[in-house]
Amino acid sequence: MGKSYFRMNDTQAFLTAEKFDELKRELDHLKTVRRKEVAESLEYARSLGDLSENAEYQEARDMQSAIEERIGYLEKIIKEAKIVAHEKKGGVISLGSVVTIQKEKEKDSRTYTIVGSDEANIHEKKLSYLSPLGEALIGKTKGDEFVFETPTGKQKYKVLKVE
C-alpha cells in the first residue's frame, strides 16, 4: 500500500459522513435562504433606477454570482464524493485514523486526524491525507519511523499510536 492508494482523481473527493452532511446543509441553505435574499436585494436595487451607476445592484449581482459558484461547487462535490468510514484494520493509518506522532529529539507528541482535503484544518488538528505529512503517514502502523521533506529539511518521526 503506497501513497497512491488514496489518490483521488480530479473529480473525486473523500469526505467523512459528518462533512458530507455539513456540505449538504450548506447547499440547502444557499439554495433556499440565500438565493431568496439576493433576489430581494436585486429587486430593491433595480427599483433605485439607473443600473449603470447603481452600487447596490452591482454588489447584489456579485453576491449572486458568488452564491451560484458555491452552489455549483457543492453540487459537484456532493454528487461525486466518496464517503469514508474509518476502519480499524490492524492499526494501519488511513483516512479517519487518529494518529499520535513524535518528532525525533522532541519530548512532546502531536495527535492528528487524517481527513480528506476538503476537511483539512490544522487548527482543529485535521490533516489532509494529500499533505506531505499526511502522505507520509498513510499505510504506516504503530512503531513505524518515517522521514518526510519539509520546507526546513527532512524530518524524522515515529508513530506512537493509531486509533
Image: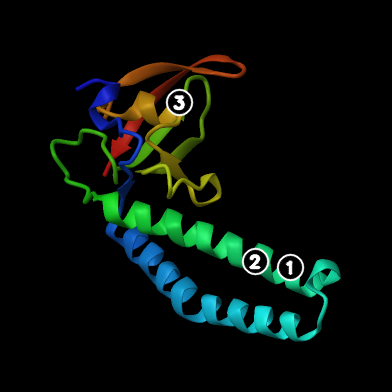
| Residue behind mark 2 | 63
**Image quarter (top left, top right, bottom left or bottom right) of the C terminus:** top left
**Image quarter (top left, top right, bottom left or bottom right) of the N terminus:** top left
Q: Amino acid at mark 1?
A: Glu
Horizontal and vertical percent position of residue 118: 43, 48
Horizontal and vertical percent position of residue 101: 40, 32
Vertical side of 97 occupied by 30: above or below: below
Nearest the viewer among 59 and 128 is 59
Vertical side of 159 occupied by 12: above or below: below
- Residue 16 position by quadrant: bottom left
Q: CA distance from mark 1 to mark 2?
A: 6 Å
- Residue 12 position by quadrant: top left
Viewer can see residue 87: yes
- Residue 14 position by quadrant: top left
Horizontal and vertical percent position of residue 160: 34, 32
Residue positioned 53% across, 26% down in the render: 106
Residue positioned 38% across, 38% down in the render: 100
Nearest the viewer among 150 and 62 is 62
Nearest the viewer among 35 and 77 is 35
Q: Residues within 10 Å of mark 2 (few under 14, many from 20)?
A: some
Nearest the viewer among 44 and 37 is 44
Vertical side of 132 occupied by 60: above or below: below
- Give the secondary structure at mark 1: helix
- Give the secondary structure at mark 2: helix
Direction from residue 140 to residue 10 in the image, left or right = right
Determine whether label 3 and label 2 are within 8 Å by CB.
no
- Give the secondary structure at mark 3: helix
User: Which mark lies nearer to you, 1 or 3?
Assistant: 1
Vertical side of 71 occupied by 142: above or below: above
| Residue behind mark 3 | 132
Determine whether label 1 and label 2 are within 8 Å by CB.
yes
| Residue behind mark 1 | 59
